[in-house]
Image (cartoon, helix red, strand yellow):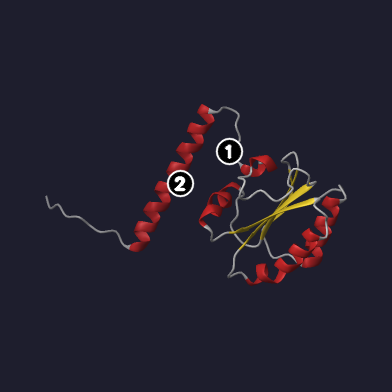
């Protein structure tokens, strides 16, 4: 019998890495559910105080709602809408918490999975109790985003 080591090609290595990663994720989900029955592994139940201090928006405890913006420096749509988002947040006099997250920053990586972010820009709006009111993972116009934020700020249906 001939024994030889075959070095995997980059695509095969990527497939192996993905398989191992998915397997580990599945095992962790099972272990966490056994260790902490009934616990939610999704950050969609995240409440403002649970955000790491570095990511918590200023005045988050007083904000009616929190807007998390996932973006990237290389994303044209993100760059186009970002000034509007900052101006809108500034016009709300502290009633809207704001957490801008660059997806290319290492500290942001864990939030990509928690919020199921697969594209940018992605916006997530949640209330003080941690309930997600609305989220979108696509290009959205300033008008559409303003309408959604206005509705949430007025405590109407998001």
Q: Which of 61 and 35 is in front in this view?
A: 61
Horizontal side, residue 32 vs residue 129: left or right: left
Q: In this view, does 1 lie above or below 143?
A: above
Q: Where is residue 115 in the image (x, y as percent from the top left)?
A: 62, 49
Q: Going by the image, does 17 lie left or right of 48?
A: left
Q: Mark 2 points at which residue?
A: 22
Can residue 47 be seen here? The reply is no
Would you say residue 18 is visible in this rendering? Answer: yes
Are discs 2 and 1 less than 8 Å apart at CB?
A: no
Give me the residue at 39% from left, 55% from top. Answer: 15
Q: Residue at x 64, y 72 (%)?
A: 76
| Residue at x 74%, y 63% (from the top left corner) | 86
Mark seen at residue 124: none
Image location (x, y in percent) of residue 108: 56, 54
Q: Where is residue 153 in the image (x, y as percent from the top left)?
A: 84, 51
Q: Which residue is drawn at 35% across and 58% down?
A: 12
Crowding at label 2, few (<14), some or many (≥20) Cα neighbours within 10 Å?
few
In-front residue for pair 19/70: 70
Question: Within 10 angstroms of label 1, few (less than 14), some, or many (20 or more) residues?
Answer: some
Furthest-left residue in this view = 1
Closer to the eye: label 2 or 1: 1
Q: Is mark 1 on a helix, strand or loop?
A: loop
In the rendered view, tell whether residue 4 sits above or below residue 28.
below
Mark 2 falls on what kind of element? helix
Q: Mark 1 points at which residue?
A: 41
């Amino acid at each position: 019998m001939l024994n030889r080591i075959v070095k995997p090609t980059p695509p095969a290595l990527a497939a192996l890495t993905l398989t191992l990663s998915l397997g580990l994720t599945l095992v962790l989900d099972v272990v966490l559910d056994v260790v902490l029955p009934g616990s939610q592994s999704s950050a969609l139940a995240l409440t403002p105080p649970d955000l790491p201090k570095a990511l918590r928006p200023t005045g988050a405890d007083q904000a009616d709602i929190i807007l998390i913006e996932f973006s990237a420096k290389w994303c044209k749509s993100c760059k186009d809408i970002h000034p509007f988002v900052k101006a809108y947040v500034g016009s709300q006099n502290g009633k809207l918490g704001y957490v801008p997250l660059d997806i290319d920053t290492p500290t942001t990586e864990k939030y990509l999975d928690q919020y199921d972010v697969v594209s940018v820009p992605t916006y997530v709006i949640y209330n003080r109790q941690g309930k997600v009111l609305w989220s979108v993972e696509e290009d959205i116009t300033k008008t559409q985003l303003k309408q959604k934020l206005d509705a949430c700020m007025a405590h109407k249906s998001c």
